[in-house]
Amino acid sequence: MDIKNTLFELSETSGASGNENPVSATALNMLKKYCPDAEIINGNVTGRFGEFRENLPSLILDAHIDQIGMIVTYITDDGFIKVGNLGGIDRRLLPAQPVVIHGKNDIKGVICSVPPHLSDGGKDVPSFDDIAIDTGFSKSELENMVSLGDTVTFDVKCRELLNKRVTGGAFDDRSGITAILYALELLSNHKTKYNVTVIFSAQEELGERGAKIGAFEINPDIALAIDVSFAYAQGEDEMKCGSLGKGAMIGISPSLSREISESLINTAKANSIPYQIEVMNGLTSTNADQYSVSRDGTKACTISIPLRNMHTPVEVIDLNDIEFTGKLIAEFIKGD
């Protein structure tokens, strides 16, 4: 499996929260190689891996498939598209961004920006009331192509940087999906010590809604939420961040299973897989929060891939960390 190409294909396919269909179709096709019965259930791409055997504990591998984006709320008389946010978008970066409106067909646009010549250069961070998208079309033309409620995503192409690092959009959490697919590749022709279900869950950015459905339906004994977390960059607090290229970040939190956290750490040590510790003092803001309290509770833990510039069109990861994460997952669930 080519990790970079898989990540790029997933990341460049649109799938804002609530409109994951395009990327879900891509991910479903990839997952069917390892889970032939995979299907989309209530927005979640779901499949069973390997032979299911009686009396084995059940385990879910989860990574969310949706990305942050915007939703069309209004078309002005001047032909500008007004939007609201889907998920936590940093409004500082919005002016002058190229975007794609996913209407009847994809339409290119740019978010309007006031030139510095016409402002003092120190304007406050814009609110979404200030945001408007220019497509070049008139209102009447747009009304034939765009409907209220259509989604909008940043117009981003992935690029290679130096030393196995790459940049792009939607690495949160298409990198987690890539890591799971790589783990399944490593597990091909191996038995597992769990009955494994894979869920690429919808609408995480809107409150972990897909994971809540999946947790209730599957009712697993163990759940691993594969997501991203903060990688250190200039100006940030090193104590609150992981590092690019130093392996998966294993979560420790009162809301997570300490048993599973320690088991993951021991697995990494036993197999010489680089890892980092991520300590959280409460909820994790990942899908693990839904699994841990579903029905009568699940032993949940997070495995996070370090990522810079989260929720922007220029997220940065190290491809080695996806590889390390996939290896950790595979070794954790591999049977004797």
Image: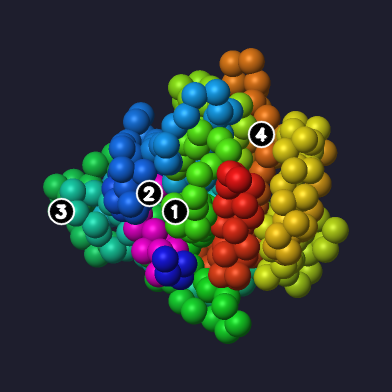
Residue mark closest to the camera, 1 vs 2: 1
- Give the quarter of the figure containing the N terminus: bottom left
- Numbered mark located on residue 61 in the image: none
Looking at the rendered structure, the kind of residue marked 2 is Tyr
Farthest residue, direction front: 336
Question: Which one is earlier in the sequence, the residue at label 1 or at label 4?
Answer: 1
Dot 1: within a 10 Å radius of its alpha carbon, few (fewer than 14), some, or many (20 or more) residues? few
Residue 11 inside the magenta-drawn segment? yes
Q: Answer left or right for 310 relative to 32.
A: right
Residue sitting nearer the eye, 100 or 306? 306
Q: Which residues are magenta?
A: 5-16
Q: Which residue is mark 2?
A: 34
Q: Which residue is mark 1?
A: 188
Q: Which residue is mark 4?
A: 300
Where is residue 124 shown, x and y percent of the image? 63, 58
Where is residue 302 shown, x and y percent of the image? 66, 43
Q: CA distance from mark 2 to mark 3?
A: 45 Å
Looking at the rendered structure, the kind of residue marked 4 is Ala
Write the residue at 47% across / 36% down: 197
Badge 1 element:
loop
Q: Evaluate if marks 2 and 3 touch, with contact meaning CB atoms under 8 Å apart.
A: no
The number of callouts visible is 4
Q: Which residue is mark 3?
A: 141
Looking at the rendered structure, the kind of residue marked 3 is Glu
Q: CA distance from mark 3 to mark 1?
A: 51 Å
